[in-house]
Image (cartoon, helix red, strand yellow):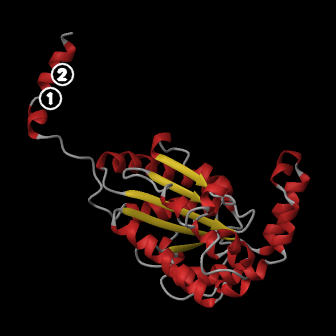
């Protein structure tokens, strides 16, 4: 199996998405990749237990990608061996009326993982510089004081929004949240194949919407917006990883390995030591229990 260096997928300087691959050859069959994923996710599950006991870090995983990029199945497969209490998944849809009465980051703030837990954002706060940038009319629905017409959603508006997102991530990182941001980079041809499969398989029909085809026509617009967002917001404390997503098992394996590789560098994440009194009396406590 091809050896993966997860840093190869990390964005550390300005990128052009056209220079990234949407698929890499692992030189093994799908079963071998799935076996590797199982090994990685079991290690992640054990690490989550330690993270919870340690209680000083939270982990936020942000997953973005075009429709059919494999976000849902990736979450299902990568986090399968986690303690259910240790990971919380939030799938962000169109903002509710309540959410519209707050700033656009509010619903993401209140969904952040507590220390000791993993939080997964399936679609994220970046929708607010992706979908809304492709469809600037949506911004008018946010009822912002300084936005009264489409003309107000200009370059200065987006500059400010990116500053706000960077500040949001810096704040939570400084307070103990380890951030991963994964862009599942799918090719247009593979998206077409997956949309056709949704139509061919009755059990997958419910996932299809005619709106998917309308958004597909805006493919190039979305790619430009993704590229700009990644370039503006990939920071050392909150890096983006561009994950080739045409092959789902490989994408899942790379995401799991990326998290494990990075989290393993935190040498201070360890289970707390028992205090001296408890440690000195372990045998006594055992005797008390055994004598019941």
In the drawing, what numbered circle is on residue 282? 1
Question: Which residue extends farthest top?
Answer: 292
Residue 61 location in percent, x, y? 51, 61
- In this rendering, the answer to whether 100 lies above or below 31 is below
For the residues bearing labels 1 and 2, Cβ distance under 8 angstroms: yes
Residue 53 location in percent, x, y? 31, 45
Left or right: 134 as drawn, with respect to 285: right
Residue drawn at x 13%, y 40% is 275
Left or right: 78 as drawn, with respect to 178: right
Q: CA distance from mark 1 to mark 2?
A: 6 Å
Left or right: 39 as drawn, with respect to 98: left
- In this rendering, the answer to whether 64 lies above or below 147 is above
Residue 243 location in percent, x, y? 60, 70
Tell which of 156 and 238 is nearer to you. Answer: 156
Residue 127 location in percent, x, y? 64, 69
Residue drawn at x 51%, y 79% is 233
What element does badge 1 sit on?
A: helix
Left or right: 110 as drawn, with respect to 280: right
Residue 244 in view (yes/no): no
In the drawing, what numbered circle is on residue 286? 2
Q: Quadrant of residue 174?
A: bottom left
């Amino acid at each position: 199996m091809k050896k993966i260096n997860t840093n190869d997928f990390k964005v550390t300087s300005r990128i052009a998405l056209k220079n990234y691959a949407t698929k890499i050859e692992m030189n093994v069959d799908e079963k071998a990749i799935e076996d590797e994923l199982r090994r990685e996710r079991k290690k992640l599950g054990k690490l989550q237990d330690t993270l919870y006991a340690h209680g000083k870090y939270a982990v936020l995983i942000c997953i973005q990608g075009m429709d059919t990029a494999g976000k849902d199945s990736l979450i299902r497969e990568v986090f399968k061996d986690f303690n259910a209490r240790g990971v919380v998944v939030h799938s962000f849809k169109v903002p509710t009326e309540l959410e519209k009465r707050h700033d656009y980051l509010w619903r993401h703030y209140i969904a952040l993982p507590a220390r000791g837990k993993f939080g997964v954002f399936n679609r994220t706060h970046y929708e607010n510089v992706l979908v809304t940038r492709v469809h600037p009319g949506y911004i008018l629905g946010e009822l912002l004081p300084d936005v009264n017409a489409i003309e107000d959603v200009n370059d200065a508006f987006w500059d400010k929004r990116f500053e706000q997102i960077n500040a949001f991530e810096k704040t939570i990182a400084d307070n103990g949240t380890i951030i991963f941001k994964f862009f599942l980079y799918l090719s247009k041809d593979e998206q077409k194949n997956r949309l056709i499969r949704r139509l061919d398989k009755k059990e997958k029909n419910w996932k299809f919407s005619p709106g998917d085809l309308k958004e597909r026509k805006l493919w190039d617009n979305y790619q430009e917006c993704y590229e700009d967002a990644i370039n503006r917001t990939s920071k050392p404390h909150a890096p983006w990883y561009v994950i080739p997503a045409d092959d789902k098992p490989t994408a899942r394996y790379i995401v799991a390995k990326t998290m494990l590789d990075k989290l393993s560098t935190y040498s201070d994440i360890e289970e707390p030591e028992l205090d001296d009194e408890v440690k000195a009396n372990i045998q006594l406590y055992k005797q008390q229990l055994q004598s019941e």
